[in-house]
Amino acid sequence: MRPGWYILNYHNVDWEDPILTRAIAVTTRPDVFRTQLEAMSKEGRFVSIPEGQAMLESGHVDEVLFSLWFDDGYSGLRENAAPICASLGIAPAVSLNARFTQRTEMFWRAKLAYLAHVDALRFVRARLRKSFESVPLKIRTWTVEHFSTELLKIIDEHYQEHASEAFRRDAFRLFAREDDVAALAASGWTITNHGAAHWPLAPELGWDVVEREFDEGEAFVRRFSPDNRYWVIPFAYGSEHYRDRLMRRATVVEVGERRNTVKSWRETGRLFRFDAPMHRDVLGALY
Amino acid sequence: MLPHDVPSETRALPAGDRRSAVYFSGDGLRQLRLGYLIQERFPGLLKAWWISAPKSSQRLRPKLEKAWRMVSSGPPSTGTMELLREGDLRNLVGIARRRIRRGDLRRLGRIVKLATRRDPYARVEEEMFGAEVKAFEARAALHPERVDRFDSEEHLARMSAIDPYLIVTFGGPLLRGRVLEKARGLAINQHAGWSPSLKGSYTTETAIYHRELGWIGNTVHVMDTQADSGAILRRSTCTLHPDDDLAHCVLAVCAVGSKLMLESIDTILHADRLDVFPQPRGGQTLLNVDFTLAKRDAVARDLRGGWLADALAATRDY
């Protein structure tokens, strides 16, 4: 492998992949996760995010370095990922969505996944077509690119209609609680900001809303990580619409399917991550 | 997760001290793992842990009988059983000429091999749970005890002495009513299948045979004397990867069940009332013999041909 800092972007590590997340493809099973980490540890050295960042800034990244970064703050991190990481001496980062951890708003993409599972997307599509033009048959990507508070309201109305109150309450078990996050922070994990509720940075939202989302996330994250400097872009989408303003506030972290080098850091000032592959051959996805 | 498609009802939990449970299990690492997980999560709760261990000759007989019935038109005679036990296919030829329905000794040999080996998933099970179970075992206070029969008078007397609030089961034989009624509170089971659609044996394999990705999951339910048919407490699907083989699918389902079981126990220990989801009639209850060699081959073909990767991709294309 070529020298550089390879940051792997995972989400959840769990035996369970319920109907709320299976369609989002965010869960890695613990045995597969361990297999992937063991393969990486034979090829390079794991560093924490602050260590890797310091090496980039000092201009010395002349070996293969790996880091792990978990998005969204799922409940499997403390129970499954943390013991495996600890056994291999790895200190990852996690980016939190404040409202998921605080159980005040469910991930809208999980609601959509649920609606797809119960065959309710036909109702969602019909309703969307009353408010938006050119709504395609497949709406997974379209909803990210055309995200707005109105779209969110439509998804939420259908989720409330098709899922019982008990199911909706139980669904928050997907996400870590605050004491889980505190435990991760205490064991050396870097806690970072992924916004309040994983809203994509669509142009329709506007900077005021985007900044408010990140500010809410930041206020929450600083309870665990007072010096946080990282803002992680949801869906790796849309940062170009707000890039200059985002970069004035924090180090912007994206999924760019590229390694970080001294050159890339000097040219962009941003960090890039690889989406962790769903198959076992993790190194094959990084070459 | 709570089931999303079955109506619920709320039940009051029986009164009395709840911090007393016994665990009946099979002897695979997946079942040992749950016994140790219960101890890690709820120290002092488990008062006894029993594994069904009939004499090896008793254990082998039903497997050999099953192998014979899968290819023959009648039950095996004593002589046939001896030859099966010895794997003596050459001398089975004479019997085969008269008794084997489809006359394929190679096929019978394959079934005997499948039926008599200890556990077809043992290698993958060791890889997935071996190190974890070993670590648990080293620090656990309670270890499994092997018993011949769960419903013997002696064993029932031991249960009465413990007077458990909770009976937990995973694997092993079906428990009879007089064993289940020893629970002051609830008897709950971890079923490696999607109830009510698939109950009984080989449910994960059968889900794949039917190409039903949504049925590759686990159900934790209240027990009655029918297989996997009591009211559901938790049910969910497991994490699958595009390059998983059958053993990984089956064992992942078991691991999800253990997670759901711990959640269920936690609720039973702390809640005043319990939301349960009585199973509607319908679905299938599968017997061991229902998972035939032809089905096993079909599942293997599907997995080799990339069905799982395709099915996972399809759920993400909406």
Image (tube, helix red, strand yellow):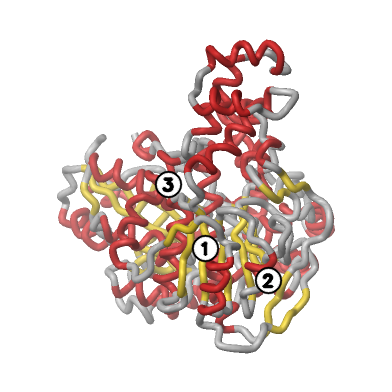
Are callouts 1 and 3 both on one chain? no
Q: How far from the left and from the top, in percent, is residue B148?
A: 51, 55
- The quarter of the displayed image where residue A105 is located: bottom right
- Residue position for label 2: A168
- A69 left or right, relative to A75: left
Local secondary structure at mark 1 = helix
Seen in the picture, residue B15 relative to A89 is either above or below; the reply is: below
Classify the position of the C terminus of chain A by image quarter.
Answer: top left
Q: Chain of mark 3?
A: A
- Residue position for label 1: B259
- If you read the primary sequence from the N terminus, does the residue marked by circle 3 or circle 2 appear first? 2
Mark 1–mark 2 contact, CB under 8 Å? no
Q: Nearer the viewer, mark 3 or mark 2?
A: 2
The residue shown at (37%, 44%) is: B127
Q: How far from the left and from the top, in percent, is residue A165?
A: 73, 75
Spatial CA span between label 1 and label 2 = 19 Å
Q: Amino acid at mark 1?
A: Lys
Q: Chain of mark 1?
A: B
- Residue position for label 3: A276
Using the image as rendered, state which of residue B233 and residue B68 is in the foreground. Answer: B68
- A281 left or right, relative to B79: left
* Residue A278 appearing in the image: yes
Q: How far from the left and from the top, in percent, is residue A9?
A: 41, 52
Dot label at residue A149: none
Seen in the picture, residue B118 relative to B174 is either above or below; the reply is: above
Q: Chain of mark 2?
A: A
The residue shown at (68%, 11%) is: B97
Local secondary structure at mark 2 = helix
- The quarter of the displayed image where residue B135 is located: bottom left
Q: Amino acid at mark 3?
A: Ala
Spot the residue most to the bottom: B16
Are callouts 1 and 2 both on one chain? no
